[in-house]
Image (cartoon, grey):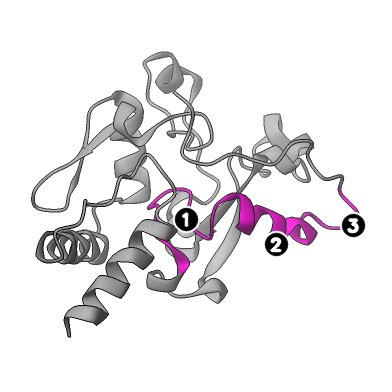
Amino acid sequence: MNGIFSHRKPSPTCRGHYRNFRQSIREDFSECCAYCLLYELIAGGEGNFQLDHFRPKSHPDFRHLESEYQNLYYSCSVCNRYKSSSWPSDRLMAEGYRFVDPCQEDFSAHYFEGEDGQWQPSSRAGEYSAARLRLNRQHLVTIRQLLSAIAESANLPCVDWNRPAKQQIMRLIVAAQDGL
């Protein structure tokens, strides 16, 4: 497993508030949400995105990670709101229920996309993440269905969620425009 996204190395050092990392994190995540994986153009635009602390800064064990570059993930505001400061208990973690880490793990290790556009969990981490982040909320499923329909009508491959989706989605948008 390589992960869908990766933080630049070496990590920049923090000068001031962690929000100063926004542009670098945005680039590292290819302008896509770390959780629903949508490109910001179809997920409300750059203004709808925030920096998420993967390990929540409000959790006592993770306070020291507040300005740690590797702990900052680019997230649409809806996914960030659902994730908020939640973190699985030690008991849940021991049972494999945790958030999927898109910087360490591939999509296909935890989910597969059904023909209906829903992401079906194939692991406990996928199950936990899908439930907590509501990764099958109706507008996400509708967007996935539309992207699949465009790909099919343009005879192009569907989005490979194991890779950042920006270029793939842009290719489908251009194909849809050409077909109009």
Give the CA separation, mark 2 to mark 3.
14 Å
Q: Answer whether labels 3 and 1 touch (C-beta < 8 Å).
A: no
Residue 33 at x, y = what percent? Answer: 47, 55
Task: Give percent across and percent down for residue 171.
Answer: 33, 65
The N terminus lies in quadrant: top left
**Which callout, 3 or 1, points to the residue nearer the camera?**
1
Question: Can you identify the residue that label 3 sits on?
Answer: 16
Where, by quadrant of the figure, is residue 93 drawn? Answer: top left
Q: In this figure, which residue is indicated by the disc labeled 2?
A: 23
Q: Considering only order in the chain, which callout, 1 or 3, is on the residue closer to the N terminus?
A: 3
Amino acid on which disc 1 is placed: Cys
- Secondary element at tag 1: loop
What kind of residue is marked 3? Gly
Q: Nearer the viewer, mark 2 or mark 3?
A: 2
Residue bounds of the magenta highlight: 14-40
Image coordinates for residue 85, horizontal then vertical, percent: 55, 46
Q: Is residue 167 above or below residue 9?
A: below
Q: For residue 27: magenta?
A: yes
| Residue 97 shown left or right of residue 137 in the figure | right
